[in-house]
Image: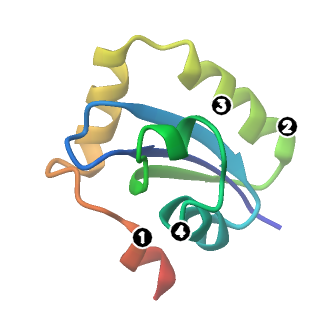
């Protein structure tokens, strides 16, 4: 089983949310459909802009904690390395 650490944002890319899941397609679908109450729903975070894949939940959890402690500029650098346009990657993972 794979585990995913992911970043989502809003249309203006002004707010980030970092999460972890074992089913990335389902989880992003839930964010897009506003089925998830809380921070992501409140700030309209539904655009998948970054994700990483892990084989163990422990590694994914450790990475999630690491990313959550990073400053915004360091997170931006990470995202820009693979997604310079901040495109929604959801269609890529659904294929």
Quarter of the figure that contains the N terminus:
bottom right
Quarter of the image for residue 58 reads top right
Residue at position x 63%, y 41% from top?
Answer: 19
Which color mode does the image show?
rainbow
Relative to the observer, which residue lies in front, 60 or 15?
A: 15
Residue at position x 22%, y 50% from top?
Answer: 86
Q: Nearer the viewer, mark 3 or mark 4?
A: 4
Residue closest to the far bottom: 95
Give the mark nearest the N terminus, 4 or 1. 4
The answer to whether 95 appears left or right of 69 in the picture is: left
Give the mark nearest the N terminus, 1 or 2. 2
Q: Does dot 1 land on a helix, a strand or a loop?
A: helix
Q: Tell me if mark 2 has few (under 14), some (14-19) or many (20+) residues whose alpha carbon lies within 10 angstroms of its own.
A: few
Residue marked by disc 1: 90
Check contact, mark 2 vs mark 3: CB within 8 A: no
Residue marked by disc 3: 63
Check contact, mark 4 vs mark 1: CB within 8 A: no
Residue closest to the far left: 85
Q: Does dot 2 land on a helix, a strand or a loop?
A: helix
Give the mark nearest the N terminus, 3 or 4. 4
Check contact, mark 4 vs mark 2: CB within 8 A: no
Using the image, tell me which numbered label, if any, was put on residue 58: 2
Give the mark nearest the N terminus, 2 or 3. 2
Residue at position x 68%, y 22% from top?
Answer: 65
Quarter of the image for residue 13 reads top left
Residue marked by disc 4: 33
Check contact, mark 3 vs mark 4: CB within 8 A: no
Q: CA distance from mark 4 to mark 1?
A: 13 Å
């Amino acid at each position: 089983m794979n585990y995913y650490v992911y970043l989502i944002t809003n249309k203006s890319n002004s707010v980030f949310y970092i999460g972890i899941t074992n089913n990335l397609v389902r989880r992003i679908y839930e964010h897009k459909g506003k089925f998830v109450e809380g921070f992501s729903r409140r700030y309209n975070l539904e655009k998948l802009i970054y994700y990483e894949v892990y084989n163990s939940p422990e590694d994914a959890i450790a990475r999630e904690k690491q990313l959550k402690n990073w400053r915004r500029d360091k997170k931006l650098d990470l995202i820009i390395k693979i997604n310079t346009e901040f495109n929604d990657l959801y269609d890529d993972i659904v294929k």
